[in-house]
Every structure is written in C-alpha cells, then in structure tokens.
Image (cartoon, grey):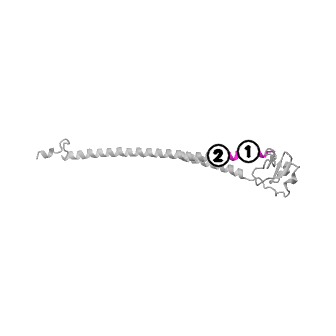
Amino acid sequence: MEEMRAQHHCARALLLLLGLAMVASQTSPPVPAPITRPCSFYSGKSCEECLRNVSCLWCLTNNTCLEYPVRSILPPPSLCAMSAARWGACWINFEALIIAMAVVAGVMLLAVIICCCYCCYCRKSSSSRLLEAEEENLIREREKRKQESLQRKNERTIKHNEIRKKYGLLQDMDHPYSKFDNE
C-alpha cells in the first residue's frame, strides 16, 4: 500500500514537472518575418524598435543598436556593459535576465533531483519495509509449523504407546531387556 502511495506521489511530481516543462517550452504567438535591416539602422531610435529584430542588442549608455555577438555567449564589456545591455525586452537588463534564467534553471534542476531522490528513497524504504515484514511473516509461519509438527509427533507417540500398551508391547523403559529375563 505504501509503495503504491509512493509511486502515486512520484507520478504526480513527474506530471507536474512535465507540465511545467511544457508550459516553459510553449512558444509565444508567431513572430512576424524578421526585419532585414541591419541593427545599426535603429541606433538613436527606441529600444523597442531595435529589439524587434532578435539578432539585435540595445545599449542603453549610448542608445545604440548593435548586432548581438553570437560567437561569444555573453556580449563583451567592450561592446556594452551588462547592466546597460538590453536583449529580448527593454524593461530588463541583460545581467538580470541571465541571473533570472540561471535561477529558474537551477530551481528546475533542483526540483528534478529532489523528485528523483525522493522517489528512489520511497521505493527503497517501502521495499525494505515490505521485505522485513515478509521475512517476519515467514519466521512466524516456520515457528508455527514447527510447533504443529511437534504437537502431531507427541500425539502420534501417545497413540502408539496406547496401542503398544493395549497389545502388551509396551516395555518398562528403565529395563528394556526385562522381557528376556523371564525366558
């Protein structure tokens, strides 16, 4: 029963994680075709106009729209300071975006690890408890059968002694050869 309950909890946790993963992986409404103009065209204009093109990076310090350096994962400080860089959304700086994404990824990874450990622990503990209970039952059954066997053996001995007594075959156990002395 406990094992079923633990498996039920594990299944619910996995479904929750899968649901979160599906929600996170869902894409927003279709994005219009990318603008073919270079990012430098939007320099001096607004951040929103610059960031419509996903390959552009807005630098708040000098209001310039730059090509995102895809060869390096993070834009170098010589291009634009992390706290002044905007990518994806104008209201959040690149530094905060990276930190937020790292925290979300860390929390999801931690949740998966905790779920796996919990499920493994539950299975192990419920399995060991079941094995211990089964072993105790086997020991009790063995003792019960042994007692019943001894009881039947004693009953057979009593019955055989009665039959021997009835037919005069029961001898004095102190002197097993007393029967032969009279002959």
The Cα–Cα distance between marks 2 and 1, rounded to whole angstroms, is: 18 Å
> Residue 93's x, y, as percent?
79, 45
> In terms of secondary structure, where does tag 1 sit?
helix
Name the disc covering residue 76, or none.
Answer: none
**Which stretch did the figure color magenta?**
91-109
> Residue 44's x, y, as percent?
89, 49
Question: Foreground residue, 17 or 93?
Answer: 93
Question: Foreground residue, 84 or 173?
Answer: 84
Tell me which residue sits at (50%, 45%) in the image.
128
Residue 1 in sight from this viewpoint: no
Q: 175 left or right of 135?
A: left
Tell me which residue sits at (68%, 49%) in the image.
20
Q: 149 left or right of 50?
A: left
Q: Residue furthest right?
A: 44
Asked if the magenta segment contains residue 30, the reply would be no
Amino acid type, residue under disc 1 in the picture: Ile
Amino acid type, residue under disc 2 in the picture: Ala
Q: Residue furthest front?
A: 78
> Residue 33's x, y, as percent?
82, 58
How many numbered circles does the render carry?
2
Tell me which residue sits at (15%, 44%) in the image.
178
Residue corresponding to mark 2: 111
Q: Main secondary structure of the magenta part?
A: helix
Residue 65 in sight from this viewpoint: yes
Viewer-nearest of discs 2 and 1: 1
Residue corresponding to mark 1: 99
For marks 2 and 1, the one nearer the N-term is: 1
